[in-house]
Image (cartoon, grey):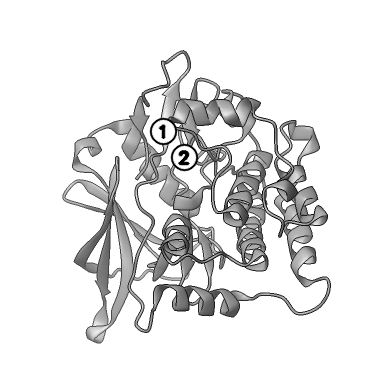
Amino acid sequence: MASLFTIESGFRYEVVRKIFEGGMGIVYEAEQHGAREFVKRIAIKVIRQTYSNQKQFIDNFIGEAKLVADLIHTNIVQTYHLGESRGVFFMAMELIRGVNLEQFTQQLRDKNRVLPTELGVFIASRIARGLAYAHNKTGADGKPFGLVHRDVSFKNILIAFEGDVKLTDFGIAKARGFLIDNEGEVVAGKADYMSPEQADFKITDKRSDIFSTGVVLAHLLLGYNVFKAETPEESRQRILTMPIPDFRKLDKRIDQRLDEILQHALAREVADRYATADLLLYDLEHYIYHSGYGPTNETVGRFIRELFGQNGHKAVHSQDGGTVQIARGTNTGTPVKVVKP
């Protein structure tokens, strides 16, 4: 598209503190400075120096930034800018003042609290809402990106203290023309959240993310992940072979309809699973709203602020998720590479 005119203006970022340091990258909190003492708090994501000269990591980092640049949705962490400074690439991103789901559930355990069922379903519905948008995203040519996140997990889902639920980290996503994709040769993701086809070195589509969302929902409701084992390899085997339980027997708060939703999302046969995130979203929202008023962002916000004793909000981002990339035929008791922070 032809431009009307050009504006050239440099950004200045003042790094305030390190938010977290993962296997492949580091995220900082920073101040973006503009004209007339304009200041905006953001997150800065950079490749760890060790990997900054490796072409594949740089290409994927740039590909991730280009992919998420136009993913503008209330349930997805927004990326503002891809830059380069002293030979190091960085992404300027939305700063979420809140916690990831792992920190959230740990706080529940520490305080002997149980997450109300309707809040767990609401959180999962917001994830499904963000995925529905991402899965349906098309390029300028009108063709679908074919985006699959492939890493929907507790570490990559953030809850702001205002109650917004946000999906983040598209670093191992696959999408037409954006990132290097070795699917079928490697399995990437967090072993206890990946879909059976993902765990079995098979080609995935958007229904893989639906299975992972089902795992997240079950984890929220039960307070633990039924697929998590002592090692990533054992978790992967559970994903592949463990019978999907009757969740009503694991928690009496789970009724028949909610168990049906979980069984549908967690169907091992891809053809038996929800075909789209929109369909999962409809069932989750119908479950919590069909009889009248249900939870909202504000409901979640009040709950999480009370849980964490937040008057002033401290910015916290997701910690190292241990996302692994395993080559086919590798002894998977020991992960080969940690590919994302």
Circle 1 Cα neighbour tier, 10 Å, few/some/many (<14 / 14–19 / ≥20): many
One can see residue 138 in this view: no
* Residue corresponding to mark 2: 172
Judge whether 99 appears above or below 239 on screen: below
Query: Which residue reaches farthest bottom?
Result: 36
Mark 2, secondary structure of its residue: loop
Specify the quadrant of the image occupied by residue 81. Answer: bottom left
Residue at horizontal 42%, vertical 70%? Answer: 5
Inter-mark Cα distance, 2 to 1: 10 Å
In the image, 306: left or right of 257? left
Task: Say which mark, if any, is on residue 142.
Answer: none
Residue at horizontal 74%, vertical 33%? Answer: 270
Judge whether 207 appears above or below 233 on screen: below
* Residue corresponding to mark 1: 324
Residue 10 lies, in percent from the top left, at 25, 67
Three-letter amino acid code of the residue under disc 2: Ile
Q: Is residue 99 or residue 209 the one in the foreground?
A: 99
Three-letter amino acid code of the residue under disc 1: Val
Residue 152 lies, in percent from the top left, at 54, 47
In the image, 136: left or right of 315? right
Residue at horizontal 30%, vertical 59%? Answer: 44
Residue 60 lies, in percent from the top left, at 39, 39
In the image, 292: left or right of 329? right
Residue 210 lies, in percent from the top left, at 66, 45
Mark 1, secondary structure of its residue: strand
